[in-house]
Amino acid sequence: MTTTLPTEFSRLGSVTGHLEDNGYTAAVVYPVGPDVDDHRLWTVEHRKRIQQCLRTYGAVLLTDLPVDLELFSAVVRTIGGEPLAYNERSTPRTEVGANIYTSTEYPPDQAIPMHNENSYSDQWPSTLFFLCHTAPKSGGATPIADSRAVLQSLGPEVQNRFARGVLYTRTFREGLGLSWQEAFQTDSRERVEQYCRDHGQRFTWTDGGLRTRHWQPAWRREPSTGAEVWFNQANLFHVSALDEEIREALALYDEEDLPRNAYLGDGSTIEEDDLAVVGTAYEKVSLAMPWRTGSILMINNMLMAHGREAFTGDRRILVSMA
C-alpha cells in the first residue's frame, strides 16, 4: 500500500516523497528532481533526517541524480562516514573507485537470495549504498526485507533450532570459487592466519588451499533501535542455494570440500525445509523497487536484508559500504 509521507519528513526543501508499506516493511522514497541544483549540498543539509529515516524505516531511495562517482562517494561520506574496503570477500566484485565496487558479479539469470551484508563475519557495514549506473532492460530489482519482521515471522521451532547459531564453512582451492588470496586480499599466509585468530575463525591449510570454520549467531540486536533482527547468511551459504547444475557438478567433492556451506552452530545439518520457511518469511515482508538510472538506494544493513532479481540486458549497480 502507499501512504502519505509523514509530516516530519515532508519538510525537506524541494523534495517530495511517499512511504511504501506492504504491511510488514517500509522504505522512504525521496525523489530528487532537477530543481535541486547542488546535490552535495542537499545531502549535507538533510543528512540528519536521512539518517533518522534509515534508523526508522531501514531504507531511503534518492532518484534522478547524475551518474557521477564523485557525487556517489560524497553521499556515502556525508551519510555513512568513511567508506569501507570489501574484506573477507565471499563473492566476486571489481573495485571501480576508492572503496566503490561493482555489485556481485553473478550471471544475470541467477537471482541472489536476500541476506544482510557480511553477516557471516564478526564485522559488517552498518549502511549500504547502491548507485544505479545502468538500469537493466527487465528485472534486476534489489528486493529488501525488514529483518525485524523476518525474525518475528519464523515459528518457535525454527527459532529454537537456529538459537544454536550458524556455522559457516569455506574451502578455498584453485579453480573452485574465490581463492583465499582474493577473499582475504593478501598473498601472505601469516596475515590470513592472524586474521582468523583475531576474528575467532578456525583454519586449516590443505594440499589444495585453505579451509575455515566460523560460528556466528543467527540473530542480533540492532544498536540504534534495540530491535532484534534476523541477521545471517545461512540461506545464501547453504549448498541448497546453488543452481541445480552447479550442485550436480559439486557432487564430485566431499561435503567438507565445498567452496562454502552452512550448518547449525553445533555442526548439525540445516534442514532445507527450515530454509524454505526462512525464504517464505523474506518474501512475505519484501519490497522490490525497479531500478532507474541515477538512483541511490541506502539501507540500514541490520534492519534490512537485500537480494537481487534475475535480469536481462545491461545492469550496472555500484556499491559502497560504510
Image (cartoon, helix red, strand yellow):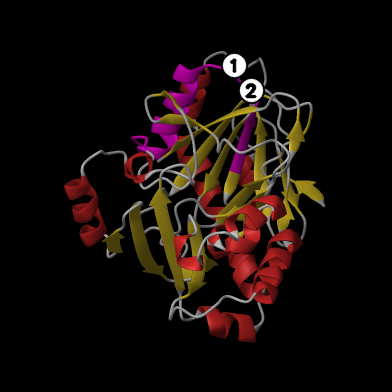
The stretch in magenta equals 60-85
Please report contact status of discs 2 and 1: CB closer than 8 Å, yes or no: yes
User: Where residue 288 appears, x then y in whole percent?
Assistant: 73, 45
Q: Nearer the viewer, residue 294 or 157?
A: 157
User: Tag on residue 294?
Assistant: 2
Residue 249 appearing in the image: yes
- Residue pictured at 35% horizontal, 51% vertical: 208
Give the Cα separation between the discs numbered 2 and 1. 6 Å
Residue 82 sits above or below residue 205 on the image: above
Disc 2: CA contacts within 10 A as few (<14), some (14-19) or many (>=20): some
> In the visual, does 317 lie left or right of 311?
left
Residue 115 sits above or below residue 319 on the image: below
- Residue pictured at 44% horizontal, 29% vertical: 100
Label 1: element kind: loop
> In the visual, does 228 lie left or right of 181?
right
Image quarter where the C terminus lies is top left
The numbered mark, 2 or 1, whose residue comes first in the sequence reads 1
**Count of numbered tags:** 2
Disc 1: CA contacts within 10 A as few (<14), some (14-19) or many (>=20): some
> In the visual, does 13 lie left or right of 118?
right
Q: Nearer the viewer, residue 269 or 164?
A: 269
Q: Nearer the viewer, residue 275 or 144?
A: 275
Q: Write down the quadrant of residue 222 in the picture.
A: bottom left
> In the visual, does 95 lie left or right of 24?
left
Q: Which residue is mark 1?
A: 66
**Magenta residue check for 83:** yes
- Residue pictured at 52% horizontal, 60% vertical: 253
**Magenta residue check for 283:** no
Say what amino acid the circle numbered 2 marks. Gly
Label 2: element kind: loop
User: Where residue 31 appears, x then y in whole percent?
Assistant: 68, 29
Say what amino acid the circle numbered 1 marks. Pro
